[in-house]
Every structure is written in C-alpha cells, then in structure tokens.
Amino acid sequence: MLQINDLHVSIGETQIINGISLSINSGETHAVMGPNGSGKSTLANVIAGNPNYSVTKGEIIYKGNNIVEMPPDERSKEGVFLAFQYPVEIPGVKNRQFLKTALDAKRVHSGQAEMPIREFNKLYQEKIKLVGMKSELSKRFVNDGFSGGEKKRNEILQMLMLNPQLAILDETDSGLDIDALKIVANGINEFRNKENGILLITHYQRILDYLSPDYIHVLLDGKIVKSGSIDLANELEEKGYSWVRESLASE
Ligand code: ADP
Ligand code: MG
C-alpha cells in the first residue's frame, strides 16, 4: 500500500529526513519510535502532504502511484489520514458538520453520492460512543477549547468516520489518562482490518501492548536505524535510545 524509497525531506534549508525507506502492506501496523526531534512528525506530515515540507529526493508510492506532487486534499480523498500530534482548533466550524463535509468529499471523489443524513447520524452516534465522547462536544467548534485528551479522541473519531486506508497516528496516545488510552487503543483496534494500514508514532510501551504492531522502527536523526518486532520496543523501554546510538557506533 505504501512504499517509501530513499526519502529526503527538508524544511527551508534544513535537511530533516536523510534517506528513509519503509514499506507498509495492507493489514499491517507499523510503530515508529525515536527521541524528540528525530523527524517522526516530519515523516508523518510529508506522507500527508503538508506543503511546509519539501521532498528533495526519493519517492512516496501509495497504491502504486508516486504521490509526492499530489496535493494534501487529494491524498486525503484517496484514503490517507493523519491524526495530528497537536490537533488544530477551528473556531467557527462545528465538529459534526466538519466530519459530514469531509466524509462527503471523500464519497463524491470515489463516485458515490453524499451520505444521507440519517445514515450519517447513525454512524456518528456509533463512533462517538466508541471513543467515549460526550455528544455535547459535537455541537462545539472543531477542537475549540477541547482538553488535550478530548482533542486526541476527536482525532480518532475522525479516523473512524473517514475510514482511511492509511492512518498515520502522530503521538495520539500522548497526554491521555489510562482510561482514555484504553478507549483510543480500542478505537484503533476496531478500525484495523486486512485492507488498511497504520503508521503509529509513539513514545510509550503501553499502547504497543494494546495494539501489538507487526513492526517497530527506530528513527534517529532522520533515519530508520533499527527495525524489528515488538521485542525491540521492550528493549528500548529497558535500555533507552542511548543504547541504539551506542550499538550503531560499535557496528
Ligand atoms: P519529532 O516528531 O521526532 O519530535 P519533528 O519531525 O517534529 O521531530 O522535528 C524534526 C526536526 O525538525 C527538529 O529538529 C525540529 O526542530 C525541526 N523542525 C520541525 N519543524 C520545523 C520548522 N517549521 N522549521 C525548522 N525546523 C523545524
Ligand atoms: Mg513529533
């Protein structure tokens, strides 16, 4: 579904990603871990098409096409979804209306009619329940005045409603209490199927225990320096990133 080849990315003059290659097949969950500033959000944003980042070399093949030049809304309509590390507040746009509009844009893109309001309501109620969101929040503006945890749940709600093929989750588990974390993990597990793929950026072992990803990658200074199974995450938890740096230095 996704094949990233020798990707180099810069912001302005600064090179942030220095040659990442990564493949995600349908049905797979990949976790990316790495210290602050290693380029995790940059990777997430560049796949989603954030125009602030420029690809200076390499390619991002999604469903068989290089999408490097594809505008972000087009990528979204083609099934790419990014849950932001820092979700934006959009005063003036109601949460529910935002989701209806986004969902309809996707449907129209794929040749379907807009979703009938009754069907939408049913789906919406179902997903709201799944993420344990107070229905009062849906009448408010997108993320406007939401708590940190509410914003993260709202990102998962968006994912569940839009049902993307590739979901990139940038530290969606950060700043959640234990109950909220369980709910978010539940939502992700509910979403997962043979047809979609997940790129999960995280610092924490706990969400990995709930999701048991197929692969773990360690990102360091804009490069994937180690990949492995869940055991790698356990090792990281125990020994920290300095262990990765040291083991690289001694190779
Ligand atoms: P991570 O998500 O792994 O913590 P980021 O991808 O957010 O890391 O950032 C990687 C590096 O890029 C950091 O050194 C950060 O300061 C830098 N960076 C991110 N955004 C910008 C920007 N808009 N301008 C300049 N440097 C940036
Ligand atoms: Mg980040």
Image: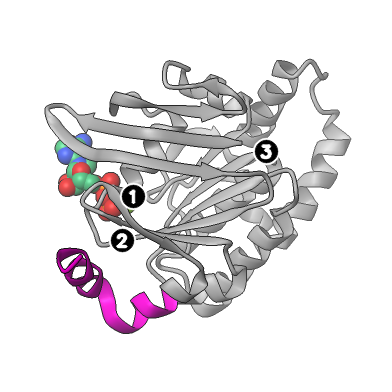
> Is the residue at mark 2 in contact range of ligand 1, meaning its CB lies under 8 Å from it?
yes
Q: Main secondary structure of the magenta part?
A: helix
Q: Residue 162: which disc? A: 3
- For the point 38% across and 37% down, the residue is 45
Q: Residues within 10 Å of mark 1 (few under 14, many from 20)?
A: many
Tag 2: amino acid: Gly
* 3D distance between C-alphas at marks 3 and 1: 23 Å
Is residue 35 shown above or below 106? below
Image side of residue 43 versus residue 208, left or right = left
Whether label 1 lies within 8 Å of ligand 1 gets the answer: yes
Q: Is residue 224 left or right of residue 164?
A: left
Residues under labels 2 and 1: Cα distance?
A: 7 Å
Q: Residue at x 57, y 77 (%)?
A: 179
**Element assignment for label 2:** loop
| Marks 2 and 1, the one that precedes in the sequence | 2
The spot of residue 234 in percent (x, y) is 43, 79
Q: Are marks 2 and 1 in contact (CB under 8 Å)?
A: yes
Amino acid on which disc 1 is placed: Lys
The boundaries of the magenta stretch are 233-251
Q: Which residue is mark 1?
A: 40
Residue for badge 2? 34
Q: Is residue 207 visible?
A: no
Ligand 1 placement by image quarter: top left
Nearer mark to the viewer, of 2 and 3: 2
Q: Tell me the quadrant of the picture where the N terminus can be found.
A: top right
Place of residue 16 in the rendered image (x, y in percent of width and height, measured from the top left): 21, 39
The residue at the point 51 percent across, 43 percent down is 23
